[in-house]
Image (cartoon, rainbow, N blue to C red):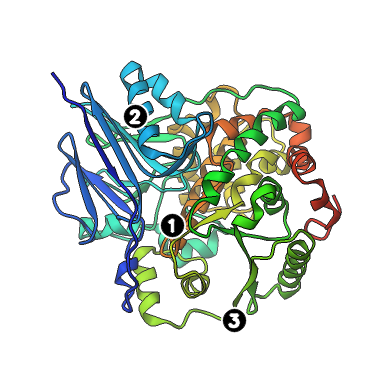
Amino acid sequence: MFKTTKHHHAPVEIPPDESYENLVFARGYAVGDLLTSPPVPMWHKLELSGRMLFWDPRLELSHVSHDGFSVTLLGHAIHLLDDTDNLQEIVEKLATRRRHSRESYVSELEKLAGRFIAIDGTPSEAWIQSDAGALRSIYYSSEGGFIASHQNLIAEMLLKVTPSIFGTRAWRNSNRSFTYPGNKTHWNEVSYLHANHEIEIGSMDIRRVSLDPPLNISTSEVVNLIVPLLRIQVPHLAKRQKPLVSLTAGQDSRTTLAILRDQRNSFDFFTYGLTYAQRQEAVQSDLDTSLELASAKGLDRHRILNVNGPLTNKALSTVLRRNSPKSSNPNVIEKYLEEFPDSRMHIRSSFNEIGVSNYRRKYPHDKITPELIALIHTYGSGYTAETLKAKQEYVLGTNLLGVDGYHPLDLYYWEIRMGSWLGTINSESDVAFDTHILINSRLIIKYLLSAPYAERIKTATYDQIVKTCWPELYNIPVNGVMR
């Protein structure tokens, strides 16, 4: 007879530290058969059928084990059909589905929005996957048997690692790229797990998560399905401590603002003011539009986040370099810590454009090849042999060309352009706050990709969302253009 066990750990506040040691691998985790001690001293631990999971206590965790089946969720989630963000309730339902069948469990995960990792296990195996967009990243080392939130965390646990070609300046100079290609990282011994994939903790076997195909319905039908799923998240986000929304002049931000309309006064808004940026005209235009939006639409809790130069704080810089070999805007991270000293939830809009099918519009090729994928990855500027090889491995190893109902370039945009790049951005800001994106659910993304292609490339879905939820937002230009 198996007994039922339940564990729930609420997130806790970690006091500031002048040395910034409290920010080392912030909001991270590590799991593996061979792990015996926490990689960060203050992290919590949980044994999962002989496998040890360690995690930063700033993250919420719920675990249920019954009849030999267990489910663990680490992070935050909102069930879009049950209208709850109670992690314990969500995990209990997932565990019930898992006892019934793994297909039922995966189908239930599809209905979650949030940023989390999910582990389902039996006494003989345990599989781990991330949220829809892999925004809580998963890195792994087949050599060491480690899985973790940060590639540098695995590198530290392995003790001896070597930089890969993709971590060199020479590769970056010869390949104009937004992220590493395929599942590659800065380290030869560390790999990245793509969105829509899962890995077995012991054997390190990898497989694609099954996806329900899009529905092929009208844009109006898509909007009617999506808007309730977006709106249902707002009260759950609003009840958190002073949630933050980054506001820009773009379409993605306008769509998020439209959804937040009825509870906009529950959120703090901010706009980046990068006074040192080269494209000052674009930065100023973004600021002007955001200020106009805030004034016209009653966003009283709006501020400009002025970043006046590069990061000079050596202690913080050292921690950020330890956390990640690749950093986008460390000076912005410093500003986050100065302006938002309390633990917040940051609502971003960066993932929204997945429904537009940008790559299919820019590269209207009948035949999708690794060469085309490599060209897209390097912005059409050309690629080296190493990049092409990594793309060949990605295309073949993930069955990119054979997922029922999904165009390969839509999947590539989802799994690499957004999953790999945006996951890294979110991990960098984890030292200041956690992140939520309204459309980060496989159910919502499936609906977004159900609209007619000709409508999607014109952003018709997002236009209809704004016109349905807050049409007056289009009285103000979107990136300088009236919609």
Q: Which amino acid type corresponds to the residue marked 2 in the rendered image?
A: Glu
Q: Residue at x 56, y 41 (%)?
A: 233
Question: Residue 22's quadrant in the figure?
Answer: bottom left
Q: Which amino acid type corresponds to the residue marked 3 in the rendered image?
A: Asn
| Circle 3 Cα neighbour tier, 10 Å, few/some/many (<14 / 14–19 / ≥20) | some
Q: Nearer the viewer, mark 2 or mark 1?
A: 2
**SS for callout 1:** helix
Residue 17 x, y percent position in the rendering:
32, 75
Residue 106 x, y percent position in the rendering:
42, 26
Q: Residue at x 15, y 54 (%)?
A: 37
Residue 26 x, y percent position in the rendering:
35, 60
Q: Which amino acid type corresponds to the residue marked 1 in the rendered image?
A: Ser
Q: CA distance from mark 3 to mark 2?
A: 48 Å
* Circle 1 residue: 427
Q: Mark 2 or 1 closer to N-term? A: 2
Query: Are discs 2 and 1 less than 8 Å apart at CB?
Result: no
**SS for callout 2:** helix
Instruction: Check the picture and name the quadrant holding the N terminus.
Output: top left
Q: Is residue 408 visible?
A: no
Q: Nearer the viewer, mark 3 or mark 2?
A: 2
- Nearest to the observer: residue 446 or residue 199: 446
**SS for callout 3:** loop
Q: Work out whether 453 lies above or below 373.
A: above
Please tell me the numbered disc located at residue 308.
3
Q: CA distance from mark 1 to mark 3?
A: 23 Å
Q: Is residue 393 visible?
A: yes
* Circle 2 residue: 92
Horizontal placement of 261 versus 467: left or right?
left
Question: Residue 368's quadrant in the figure?
Answer: top right
Q: Mark 3 or 2 closer to N-term? A: 2
| Circle 1 Cα neighbour tier, 10 Å, few/some/many (<14 / 14–19 / ≥20) | many
Please tell me the numbered disc located at residue 183.
none
